[in-house]
Image (cartoon, coloured by chain):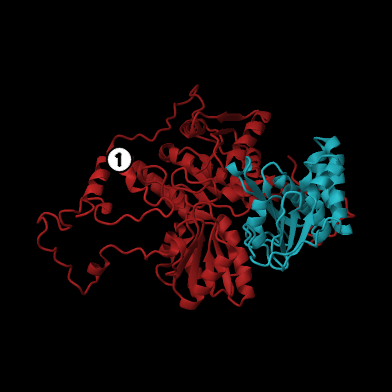
Chain colours: A red, B cyan
Amino acid sequence: MTTVPPPVEDPSFSLAGTREPPRRVLMKGNEAIAEAAIQAGCDAYFGYPITPQAELLEWMAKRMPEEGRAFVQAESELGAINMALGAGAAGARVLVSSSGPGVSLMAEAMSYMAGSEVPMVLINVMRGGPGLGSIGPSQSDYFQAVKGHGHGDYRVPVLAPSSLGEAMEMVATAFELAEHYRTPVIILADGIMGQAMEPVEQHYRTPPRQTASWALTGADGREPRVVRSLHLAPEELEEHNAHLQEKFRAIAEHEVRWAGERLDDADLVIVAYGTAARVARTAIARARAAGLRVGLFRPISLWPFPSAELAGVADRTRGLLVVELSAGQMVEDVRLAVAGKVPVAFEGRTGGMVPSPDEVVEALRELDATGSSRRARRVRRRPPIPVSGADHMHPHEPMAEPETGHDALSIFGDDAWMPHWYTVPVPTHPTRNGRGRGHGRNGSAERRRGDEGGTR
Amino acid sequence: MERSIVFAGFGGQGILFAGHVLAEAAMNAGAEVIWIPSYGPEMRGGTASCTVIVGDEPIGSPIVDHPDVAVVFNPPSLAKFGPMVAPGGVLIVNDSLVEAPSGRDDLDEIRVRCTPLAREAGDDRLINVVALGALVARTGIVPPDRIREALHAIVGKKRPEALVVDLRAFDLGMAAVASGTGQLTDRPAVEESATPV
């Protein structure tokens, strides 16, 4: 497809007389991302339908055969991701997309790909969780993408676009990162980004192909190559891990991406990514109109997280407000980054709900007034996460002796093995009052025991 | 400056289409725009809605707490979005299906007999395009020609015969507001409650 020049900005709405052809095209996020992947040279796509990313798969189903490339709707997400592992091992430029529940199924193969260093780009159009949750927009897969998915010591780069234009460019960047570092790369979008239509300039980029010196292309006339994550000898696996860690350090050093807006004079700074950053942008405009000097720090790479950069910004502010479409996930990385130097408040909605700009402005006011963030509404009405044993860690206080009367072999007491709900009352579900306990009939043996023991 | 418009009604009333046409027109008028549908099971018979935000700078929040304009096609949509419209905003009501007034006295409330006008245009399903005409005539948010171009682009290529009817429905919606025949200003306002049932 040809590249067109950027449009001439004209804020006037009164262009009824002009008849120049439109330079921008209205595209749905899922479709724009899919087309960007095709233009970036994606050789093979594997997927399984799930809302809110279904149009991405649909677009690939239509377009990939047109381009003479591979499209497979697998029998499940497990099938899709393992096909991606195979195609990636053969040196193909591979894209997979899904939403939270499907990405959870892909966890095992993500670990295998990280371990065997197979490049691949995975797009997660996040929806509300946990479980099947809802199909509404969400950012509750931050932990999954940044800290989790599969087992083992590994990380993968995670990129978070905040507009469709950025998402399209990011697809090409993700392929570059994946192939340069031989690693899976995740793009974290959300339901709004997948479903919304925005005008996009059809700027596409095709990263140059790098010679895949390791790809399994047939050993005719050369030494066989091996792509695997299995290293049974501990020494060998440790050496492999050391190599991986060195690679992760290089990524952490070179691939940090973030954007700042109106930070020059900001007293308070909102930290948000993706759709939450767009809500924040509107909130910042309103807050500034009301006299608060607020800026935006927008992480674009969620791993590596722009910790040092955020700490530098935090030094010049009185407080940070983290806004997420979650119960609070990235906020942990923000707190790690600023290490208590400034208060870090949190504003978030879950389940497919999106914080409104006014809610964010209200949170900014509270942060401005109190300088601290123990906000308390909705999901915010919860105690701060306790630091386990913090009292005993005080250097001037001797560690408390275990209370007498407990098993001498356990400093925790003899009921420490019990699940917490054995002794702690379980909050009843607001919309399912009275039904929760009834499930004990079909529950596990432990659960039944817990019900009976609840009176003790 | 940003202006937000919510279209809401039953799935099948062409809610998403009306928003799509407006978004395409706004884009071609040089504006920034975002179109967000309600997506999922509610589109199969339940309430569907979409939000279009038009602005002269890149659009910030895709979620609108107080839309400037709401175009409502059925009673549940009036109940949901009527109270949310920003004070001083515009409320366009499909008078063919919604009997109750919004009960708000701080809005420019326009009631349009969508179904008779759509039928007059040649297809009584086109209540969405009639309402779009009323919206453009009342707010001037995009030049009418941009809407006609958008209809050409979205409908015309695939179904040229439908385009003629669409354009007629759009013009009838515009004319209804311009001439005042689309308005029923003599409806008594509900005094008891600001929230319609």
Pointer 1: residues within 10 angstroms few (<14), some, or many (20+)?
few
Q: In terms of depth relative to the viewer, which is nearer, B115 or B151?
A: B115
Residue positioned 78% across, 46% down in the render: B127
Q: Chain of mark 1?
A: A
Residue A420 is situated, as x and y percent measured from the top left of the image, at 27, 53
Residue type pointed to by label 1: Arg
Residue A376 is situated, as x and y percent measured from the top left of the image, at 44, 67
Residue A174 is situated, as x and y percent measured from the top left of the image, at 56, 46
Q: In terms of depth relative to the viewer, which is nearer, A183 or A412?
A: A412
Residue positioned 11% across, 55% down in the render: A407
Residue positioned 64% across, 56% down in the render: B79
Q: In terms of depth relative to the viewer, which is nearer, B148 or B81?
A: B81
Q: Secondary structure at mark 1?
A: helix
Residue A251 is situated, as x and y percent measured from the top left of the image, at 47, 51
The answer to whether residue B140 shows anywhere in this view is: no
Q: Is residue B132 left or right of residue A304?
A: right
Placement of the N terminus of chain B among the 4 image quadrants: bottom right
> In this figure, which residue is indicated by the disc labeled 1?
A441
Name above or below for residue A412 compared with residue A134.
Answer: below
The answer to whether residue A236 shows anywhere in this view is: yes
The total of numbered circles placed on residues is: 1
